[in-house]
Amino acid sequence: MDSTLPSPNPASSISPSTSLYDSILASMFAPPPTVLIATILAIFFVPIFIHFIVFRSRSSISLPTFLLVGPAASGKTSLMTSVKTGQPPAETRTSQAPLSLECSIPASIAGTSKYRSVNDPSLKAHKKFLLLDTPGHGKLRHIALTRISSPAIRGVIFVLDSSLTDVRAVAGYLYDVLLTLQNSATSSTTTQPKKLLVACNKSDAFTALPPSKIQKLLEDEITKIRVSRSKGILDVEDDGEGNDEKEWLGEGGEGPFTFQSMEEVGVEIEFKGGSVENGEWRDRLSPWIGECL
Ligand SMILES: Nc1nc2c(ncn2[C@@H]2O[C@H](COP(=O)(O)OP(=O)(O)OP(=O)(O)O)[C@@H](O)[C@H]2O)c(=O)[nH]1
Ligand SMILES: [Mg+2]
């Protein structure tokens, strides 16, 4: 009788799960060259790719936008180019489609920077925004009016020629812009007022009127337009569809119209004079744009 017991085989005592574990560990610490190269490439390029996607989508979708509106040949396209380049353009053509340009102002003038320390390095950066030019021709004004209520719009710049040769036509377009802003402010869920800057351009011209005089003439003309339009509206009964958009300007819509009274319906208006020819708009617009950002 063989009394010797068979010696235990060390290999047979290792379970299959232990050997799998070992082989995974071995491949992790000594990976094949192809896996090594793929991992290094992923480490370098995936963050760059994600940054590119995020950066591109933010700049194209959520950049704060300022809408340029106003009658034809008032200087909207010229003003936009001069804010971007600091120089008046050599020549412009009648606009037939909207056009946007990316511009920037020093972050120190932006409204959100007023509580920062003067030593905050972020104040040395620039704040980007878009200027969106629209055609002034009567048949193409719907392009501007439909964009006024867009959430990306931080402010509207109404550009007019300071000579104000046709005050009725200018006041008529401004009336439509104000009405759209008023309806947008009253239907908005935020209490943030809508901002409008009336840019009295071409102040270099001999016939140019000062902004205070332009403001008064426009107020008188809008008062007349409001009276004539309200007569038409009173004849029309409520359409019964719960449409609460107002068709007249101001809280009550009675008496003389003033731009100041638009604050009661959530629209803040400022007047500024300047000239593209003299390269004045970049400095004159920056504080107002900074407040809106
Ligand atoms: N004198 C003077 N001329 C200006 C000024 N700004 C613009 N212009 C001239 O006014 C004309 C019309 O300018 P645009 O910028 O094309 O006007 P716009 O408002 O874009 O016109 P539309 O595209 O038709 O709506 C051009 O000949 C400009 O050179 C200014 O400040 N002073
Ligand atoms: Mg134009």
Image (cartoon, rainbow, N blue to C red):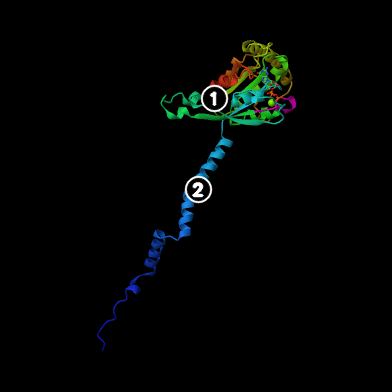
Q: Could you tell me residue 187's position as x and y percent?
A: 60, 28
Magenta stretch in the rendered image: 133-141
Residue 137 belongs to magenta span: yes
In the visual, does 101 lie left or right of 92?
left
As drawn, the residue found furthest toward the bottom would be: 1
In the visual, does 22 lie left or right of 265?
left
Ligand 1 closer than 8 Å to the CB at disc 1? no
Report the residue at 49% width, 55% height from top. 38
Number of numbered markers: 2
Residue 36, image quadrant: bottom left
Question: Dot 2: few (<14), some (14–19), or many (≥20) neighbours within 10 Å?
Answer: few
Amino acid type indicated by mark 2: Phe
Q: Could you tell me residue 94's position as x and y percent?
A: 72, 26
Q: Which residue is nearer to you in this view: 148 or 40?
A: 40
Amino acid type indicated by mark 1: Cys
Residue 292, image quadrant: top right
Badge 1 marks a residue whose secondary structure is helix
As drawn, the residue found furthest toward the left would be: 3
> Whole-Å distance between the Cαs marked 1 and 2?
37 Å
Badge 2 marks a residue whose secondary structure is helix
Q: Nearer the viewer, mark 1 or mark 2?
A: 2
Ligand 2 closer than 8 Å to the CB at disc 2? no
Read off the residue under disc 2. Answer: 45
Question: Dot 1: few (<14), some (14–19), or many (≥20) neighbours within 10 Å?
Answer: some
Residue 284 belongs to magenta span: no
Q: Which residue is nearer to you in this view: 178 or 143?
A: 143
Quarter of the picture containing the N terminus is bottom left
Read off the residue under disc 1. Answer: 292
